[in-house]
Image (spheres, rainbow, N blue to C red):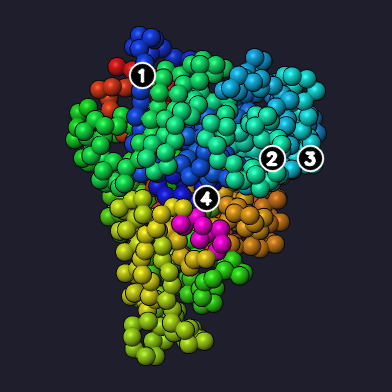
């Protein structure tokens, strides 16, 4: 994850949710189409390298365990599980009779192969979840045994939630380079989920067909079309015109115009989305040396008017953020970190005290080596409110003698720059897991390698050691203490300067469909099988 991603993409990972039977009101032999509008469909259908669009991946692939209602963990491909007294061996009962969407069997053998394959090949999108696993085996077709090197507390709540079970006959004979570059839409999308890919045109549309052999039963919606729109205004107008039935990640600017239409229902919820400013911290990154200075980073923190951002850019559907573990994660959110107030006077004072003055009186301070405090400030071009956020940040920086030129670029361009650590400051949004394990893993040194999740490039051996503590602590208080310290370390380093905790907002045409009221939190996959009706 989640993944760094623009709003409507940070789905670092929350939409793979459990399904239960339901009854639709429309005759079963009448084809049903659900059109979903979005400003970004998916980066790639290849699940081994694709970081965005986890809502879509949850429709194509299944996992051993899944989330329900955005929080509780329930059975998925594994219908039950148990753990040995010493906490080292987990045994899962795999459902009988499950097949992949191409009809090939999915048993404990395929599940074991997938977990081992992800670990052995260090698959970027999934391997970080499987730390501490030393052996996976399938004694028979319905029994999966996972052996750990040390007991862990988050095997069910985190480790297995986002590791998709994949068909060996598609992936097993490929080299790691071939795996990463594989882009055949038909092949890479074969999974055990409720849908299959019919056609994909990047930046245009994605068409999914219901999998008739899905182990939970065929989905009530025969066809899902994801349709791409160039900007927020076009997306909102499409909903008003009836061109789309559902927007899963509605920009806050769309709430008022859509709420005024009686045929549209807007659902909101708080599930831990947030926005941050990633500061290049990689040892050999292309950022200016001055950006490594803690004083300059602290001054930047003081100069960001978070209240203005939440009020104007998010139109009130957000609150100022303090630390990278959001309040939605309960006791793991470090409440001791209050965050800095918006105070340009204090920012100017500490820069003056550090000797960073505007000697040539051009409005920009100089660093100790004489270079101006000028940085690249980038954000995603997906959404209009990104532009407003960048403008607010740039204005605050200008008031303290730091020059940035706000620039929006495509998601793919930003991802490529992040992978190479060829940037200074990038505004991102995330939709993380409900367990803090993944977010804390983002800042580990391992995640700076091979296009991992570490978008800032922060690397600290002490942090890594403490991350291992939280990953294996069985005592909740010990795990909490470790996670609170990890948050403090990132706050002090300002690898991320936190901006806002944002609401999840969805909207749908209530003259065509009825969704569960928890839609904004639960996501499409779960919602289709819970309190859903075709009208």
Q: Residues within 10 Å of mark 1 (few under 14, many from 20)?
A: some
Please tell me which residue is depicted at 59% across the width and 45% down the height of the picture: 181
Q: Which residue is mark 3?
A: 134
Q: CA distance from mark 4 to mark 2?
A: 37 Å
Element class at badge 4? loop
Q: Residues within 10 Å of mark 3 (few under 14, many from 20)?
A: some
Q: Earlier in the sequence, mark 4 or mark 2?
A: 2
x then y, percent, for residue 264: 25, 30
Please tell me which residue is depicted at 49% across the width and 66% down the height of the picture: 423
Kindly indicate whether the residue at mark 3 contacts the one at mark 1 (C-beta within 8 angstroms): no
Element class at badge 2? loop
Dividing the picture into quadrants, the one containing residue 521 is top left
Q: From what the image shows, is residue 179 above or below residue 366? A: above
Q: CA distance from mark 4 to mark 3?
A: 28 Å
Q: CA distance from mark 4 to mark 1?
A: 40 Å
Q: Nearer the viewer, mark 1 or mark 2?
A: 2
Dividing the picture into quadrants, the one containing residue 78 is top right
Q: From what the image shows, is residue 481 above or below residue 532? A: below
Q: Which residue is mark 1?
A: 32
Element class at badge 3? strand
Left or right: 465 as drawn, with respect to 239: right
- Segment tinted magenta in the rendering: 413-421
Q: Which residue is mark 2?
A: 174
Q: Nearer the viewer, residue 267 or 323?
A: 267
Q: CA distance from mark 3 to mark 2?
A: 23 Å
Left or right: 34 as drawn, with respect to 155: left
Q: CA distance from mark 1 to mark 3?
A: 45 Å
């Amino acid at each position: 994850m989640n993944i760094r991603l623009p709003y409507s993409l940070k789905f670092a990972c929350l939409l793979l949710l459990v399904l239960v039977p339901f009854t639709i009101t429309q005759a079963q032999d009448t084809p049903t189409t659900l059109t979903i509008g979005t400003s970004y469909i998916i980066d790639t259908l290849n699940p081994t390298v694709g970081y965005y669009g986890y809502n879509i991946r949850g429709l194509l692939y299944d996992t051993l365990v899944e989330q329900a209602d955005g929080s509780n963990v329930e059975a998925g491909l594994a219908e039950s599980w148990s753990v040995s007294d010493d906490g080292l061996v987990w045994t899962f009962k795999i459902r009988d009779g499950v097949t992949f969407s191409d009809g090939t069997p999915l048993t404990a053998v395929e599940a074991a192969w997938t977990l081992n394959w992800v670990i052995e090949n260090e698959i970027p999108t999934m391997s970080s979840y499987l730390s501490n696993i030393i052996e996976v085996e399938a004694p028979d077709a319905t029994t999966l045994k996972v052996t750990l090197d040390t007991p862990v507390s988050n095997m069910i709540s985190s480790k297995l939630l986002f590791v998709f079970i994949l068909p060996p006959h598609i992936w097993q004979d490929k080299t790691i380079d071939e795996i990463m570059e594989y882009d055949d839409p038909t092949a890479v999308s074969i999974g055990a989920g409720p849908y299959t890919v019919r056609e994909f045109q990047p930046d245009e549309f994605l068409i999914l067909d219901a999998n008739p052999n899905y182990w939970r039963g065929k989905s009530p919606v025969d066809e899902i079309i994801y349709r791409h729109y160039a900007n927020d205004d076009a997306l909102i107008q499409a909903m008003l015109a009836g061109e789309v039935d559902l927007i899963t990640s509605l920009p806050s600017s769309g709430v008022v115009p859509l709420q005024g239409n009686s045929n549209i229902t807007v659902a909101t919820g708080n599930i831990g989305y947030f926005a941050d400013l990633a500061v290049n911290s990689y040892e050999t990154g292309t950022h200016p040396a001055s950006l490594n200075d803690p004083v300059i980073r602290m001054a930047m923190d003081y100069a960001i008017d978070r209240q203005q951002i939440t009020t104007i850019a998010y139109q009130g559907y957000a609150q100022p953020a303090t630390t990278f573990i959001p309040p939605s994660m309960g006791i793991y959110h470090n409440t001791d970190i209050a965050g800095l107030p918006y105070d340009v006077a204090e920012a100017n004072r500490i820069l003056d005290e550090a000797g960073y003055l505007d000697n040539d009186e051009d409005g920009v301070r100089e660093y100790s080596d004489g270079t101006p405090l000028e940085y690249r400030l980038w954000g995603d071009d997906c959404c209009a409110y990104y532009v407003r956020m960048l403008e607010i940040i740039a204005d605050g920086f200008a008031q303290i003698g730091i020059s940035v030129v706000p620039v929006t670029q495509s998601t793919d361009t930003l991802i490529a720059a992040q992978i190479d650590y060829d940037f200074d400051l990038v505004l991102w949004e995330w939709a993380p897991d409900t367990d803090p394990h993944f977010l804390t893993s983002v800042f580990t040194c391992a995640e700076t390698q091979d296009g991992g999740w570490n978008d800032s490039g922060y690397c600290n051996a002490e942090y890594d050691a403490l991350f291992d503590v939280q990953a294996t602590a069985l005592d909740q208080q010990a795990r909490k203490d470790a996670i609170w310290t990890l948050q403090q370390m990132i706050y002090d380093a300002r690898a991320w300067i936190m901006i806002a905790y944002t609401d999840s907002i969805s909207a749908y045409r209530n003259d065509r469909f009825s969704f569960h009221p928890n839609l904004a939190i639960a996501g499409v996959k779960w919602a289709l099988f819970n309190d859903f009706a075709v009208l």
